[in-house]
Image: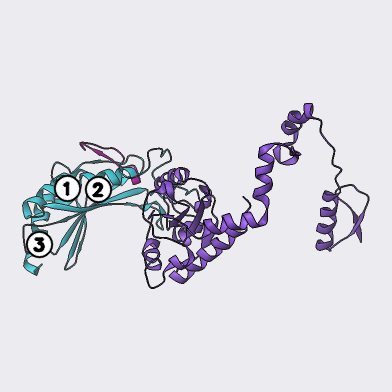
Amino acid sequence: MSESKITRIISELREGLGSSIKEEKIDKKIIKITVERDALVRAAQLLKELGYDHVKGVTGVDLSALKPPENAFEVMYHAGSHLDPELAGSVITVATKIPRDAPELPSLTQVWPSCEYHERETYEMFGIIFTGHPKLKRLLLPEWWSDIPPLRKDYKPPGR
Amino acid sequence: MYYACPQYCGARIKTGSFGLATLHSRKVVETFEESVVPEEEREDAIKRYGVGRVNRVEDKKGTNFIIQWIRRRSLVRYLVNWGRLSSLFPVHLTTACCSVEFAGSVSPRYDPERFGFLNAVGSLRQSDVIVVEGTVTTKMAQRVRVIYDQMPDPKWVVAMGACAISGGLYAKDSYNVIQGIDDIVPVDVYIPGCPPRPEAVIQGLLLLRDKILGEYL
């Protein structure tokens, strides 16, 4: 991605989102912006207008094992583009932090339909509830699973 | 320094001599008095002491005794076991990446048919050996057990690779990997390695052959 394209995308995002952007990390192939929870859908719509047409993955991170600990989950949407040849090699990441006590987030399936299964996986591995998701059920874990979501840091594996 | 026997038999044991102490305790266990339980009280005795503690004397009459007597002869045992170990049909069950090495070890270069280990073709209802090739997750564990239950007797299990033995890479901190398949099926031979070389697989097969040859019918 050329320098002018990066600056254009960043300026459009700043214009559209304003002060709800908390953090920016700009690299040649990866751009990461951290936004507030309320501005997530707006950011996704902006990116879709800019040419990012699908989600490559949804990542959840439990930040409670950091030093110093942070009582929050971070959810990242990695978006890419099939149609725009200039954007095709690049990934843009939209991240947001939500408190561990109330892990709720608006679902982005209305904007990017390809993040449906990724959100389901994040739901079962972290217990993050995506409001507005068409089918928020468990995807990969066994049917008899009754413990807390396994990728949370306070989960204790059974061992032997 | 001496201390009294923990079994209260009156003997005195020198302290610090662990070997002597174990020898002594074994002797005590051996000299337990055996009492014959009459037939009416046999069920009560089994309930009280468990099946393993009550010896049942076999009836030395009838066709069943004769069949068992013939089966216990060493020549018959040898012939039957030799027939079993010379045509081992494996189940084709691939759980993880060890199957690549397993496919290499049944190739013509190594040729385990020399040792009576046939190709994995056909139904699992005709099979004798199940080689669990690699990581077994909790979901796959159910299937492994179902396959093991569908195999006819006699059957043997070979655990191939570190993951099947102890969880391997996923030991202790995984939420969905079985920590060694001996939790779900009885294992006869363990083949260590990550993954094991074909030579190791063939050594495991030879160990399995030795084990089958020594088995009682």
Mark 1 and 2 residues: CB-CB less than 8 Å, in contact? yes
Give the camera-side residue of B56 and A43.
B56
Subunit under mark 2 = A
Amino acid, disc 3: Leu
Q: Nearer the viewer, mark 3 or mark 1?
A: 1
Q: Is residue B19 magenta?
A: no
Subunit under mark 1 = A
Q: Which residue is mark 1?
A: A114
**Left/right of residue A98 with respect to residue B144 in the rendered view:** left
**Do we see residue A77 in this rendering?**
no
Amino acid, disc 1: Ser
User: What is the quadrant of residue A137 in the picture?
Assistant: top left
Q: Which chain is purple?
A: B
Q: Nearer the viewer, mark 3 or mark 2?
A: 2
Which secondary structure, mark 2? helix
Gap in angstroms between the C-alphas marked 3 and 1: 18 Å
Residue drawn at the location 20% of the way across and 47% of the way down: A115
Q: Which residue is mark 2?
A: A118
Give the camera-side residue of B100 and A126.
B100
Which contiguous range is marked in magenta? Answer: A125-138
**Do we see residue A59 in this rendering?**
yes
